[in-house]
Amino acid sequence: MNDLEDAMQVASAISFGARHVITRNLKDYRGSAVPAMKPKAFLALDT
């Protein structure tokens, strides 16, 4: 990943077993090992 903070968030998500990274900037998370989604989409999940 090109941005250090984004890479650290993904590394943290992996470490804690998160299923998603929530962000308004999806393009920076293309290719992320943890799928990114927008907050509104996350809130609409029925889990």
Image (spheres, helix red, strand yellow):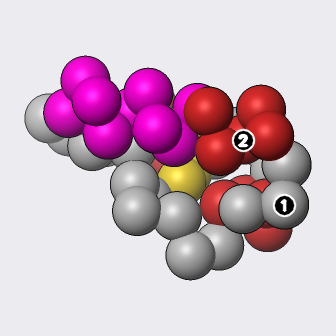
Q: Which of the 4 image quadrants contains residue 18?
A: top left
Q: Amino acid at mark 1?
A: Asn
Q: Which residue is mark 2?
A: 6
Q: Are circles 2 and 1 on residues that touch, CB within 8 Å?
A: yes
Q: Which residue is mark 1?
A: 2
User: In front: 31, or 39?
Assistant: 31
Q: Amino acid at mark 2?
A: Asp
* Residue 39 visible to an observer of this rendering: no
Q: Which of the 4 image quadrants contains residue 30?
A: bottom right
Q: Position of residue 42 (x, y in %)?
A: 45, 38
Q: Quick one: quadrant of the N terminus?
A: bottom right
Q: Position of residue 2 (x, y in %)?
A: 84, 60
User: In front: 36, or 44?
Assistant: 36
Residue drawn at (40%, 54%), measured in percent from left and top?
A: 34
Residue 30 vs 4, above or below: the answer is below
User: In front: 27, or 2?
Assistant: 2
Secondary structure, mark 2, is helix
Compared across the picture, whether 20 is left or right of 19 comes to right
Secondary structure, mark 1, is loop
Residue drawn at (77%, 32%), measured in percent from left and top?
A: 5
By secondary structure, the bulk of the magenta-drawn segment is best described as helix
* Residue 38 visible to an observer of this rendering: yes
Between the residue at mark 2 and the residue at mark 1, the CA separation in whole angstroms equals 8 Å
The magenta stretch is 9-17
**Residue at the outermost left position:** 47
